[in-house]
Image (cartoon, grey):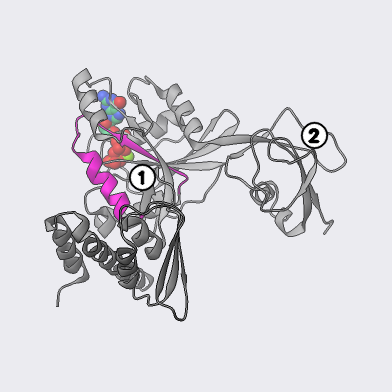
Amino acid sequence: MATIEEQIKSLEEEIGKTQKNKATNAHIGKLKAKIAALRARKEKAQAHAKASGGGPGFEVKKSGDASVALVGFPSVGKSSLISQLTEVESEIGNFAFTTLTCIPGLMEHRGAKIQILDLPGLIKGASDGKGRGKEILNVIRGADMVLYVLDPFQESHFDILDMELWKSGMRLNQREPQVFITRSNRGGIVVRSTVKQTNLTHEEIQEIVRSFGIVSATVTLRTNVTDDHIVDTLAGNRVYSNAVVVINKIDLASENDIQRTMEMIPINWPVLQVSAKTGTGIENMKDFIFENLHFMSVYLKPQGQEADLIEPLIIKDTSTVRDVCAKLHRDFVRKFRYSRVKGPSGKFDWQRVGLDHRLKDGDILSIITRRR
Ligand SMILES: Nc1nc2c(ncn2[C@@H]2O[C@H](COP(=O)(O)OP(=O)(O)OP(=O)(O)O)[C@@H](O)[C@H]2O)c(=O)[nH]1
Ligand SMILES: [Mg+2]
């Protein structure tokens, strides 16, 4: 009997051998669904093995307003960069695997506290657990942003790295697919779509859903979906994060080296060139991180007092009133009665809003809590 690993491998090979066209769409989709199911089974088996022994994880306490994981092959200069960006001294070495665990550092910039996470180098096979890959990928999955560090002299490596993150369920610089699947007791698989589906027919979509063992469900689509979108939705545990790229060691690199490195990076991803050795680009890198984390400013007006328009709260631009409460005090969510908002997110001045209200940059917020 083949191991799960071998089964995945042979399915991947089959996809590789299958010509992609209209006639094979559903077939490929089903193979992908099978791979996703096998991976989920493997995760479960590994989690089980870990619970009964195995090494410790890299638990890091989250702190600050957002966190950024430094992701790269060994020796690309991750530790050199964190030492430039923060007060932390992470060991630097001219040999691979200098860093063996997760080292957090705090970067304060433009009013935000940003946690930077230095990690051991990732290698091919990391998503299968190679080189403590599972622990490293867990930290990466939990961070708000992935910061790839590339070395212009290891140019073939970006794809390998990115594939490891993809296999671990991360979907970078992508929107969560607008696919909604609700199981039902009878009626088979019903596909409803608000847009024209040109990648897959309804029958093909039904087949992919069925290969997850689902007999009856309503599938609602709001985008033109691919097989990956459906598999991702059904497999669950996908993480949709921002990613940016920093090319390090430009003090050593020629125009050509940099050009070659740039060509591997997806065209619309943010890229910055730096040298951790000379310090070139390090100040820009702080802005680069700050801007790509997408913060906003919200001003607070304590009950019965004037609003503080000098020192805003710096929070992620996806924050709700609940996020602000959680940040201010651990009791605020529990004691919350209501809040009022004036500014871009309010329909009118001092609109009364609840915990789920999405805030906007420049809002003034007043939170009203119970006394106890
Ligand atoms: N010339 C040059 N050397 C650099 C630069 N950044 C890092 N290095 C050197 O590259 C080597 C590896 O640096 P580290 O910061 O330890 O690399 P790392 O990515 O943390 O490596 P691991 O912890 O093993 O994954 C060291 O010898 C550094 O001095 C740079 O910008 N220019
Ligand atoms: Mg290191």
- Disc 1 vs disc 2: Cβ atoms closer than 8 Å? no
**238, 205: nearer the viewer:** 205
Question: Considering only vertical position in the picture, is 49 above or below 141?
Answer: below
Q: Amino acid at mark 1?
A: Leu
Residue 222 coordinates in the image, percent (x, y): 46, 54
Residue name at image x 88 percent, y 41 percent: 304
Q: Is residue 267 left or right of residue 311?
A: left
Residue name at image x 43 percent, y 78 percent: 187
Residue name at image x 26 percent, y 37 percent: 75
Q: CA distance from mark 1 to mark 2?
A: 41 Å
Q: Quadrant of residue 24?
A: bottom left
Question: Considering only vertical position in the picture, is 224 above or below 202?
Answer: above
Q: Residues within 10 Å of mark 1 (few under 14, many from 20)?
A: many
Q: Residues within 10 Å of mark 2 (few under 14, many from 20)?
A: some
Residue that numbered label 1 is attached to: 119
Where are the magenta residues, as a range? 143-169
Residue 230 coordinates in the image, percent (x, y): 36, 60
Q: Is residue 202 left or right of residue 104?
A: left
What secondary structure is marked by label 1?
loop
Q: Earlier in the sequence, mark 1 or mark 2?
A: 1
Residue name at image x 73 percent, y 27 percent: 310
State yes or no: residue 109 in magenta: no
**58, 244: nearer the viewer:** 244
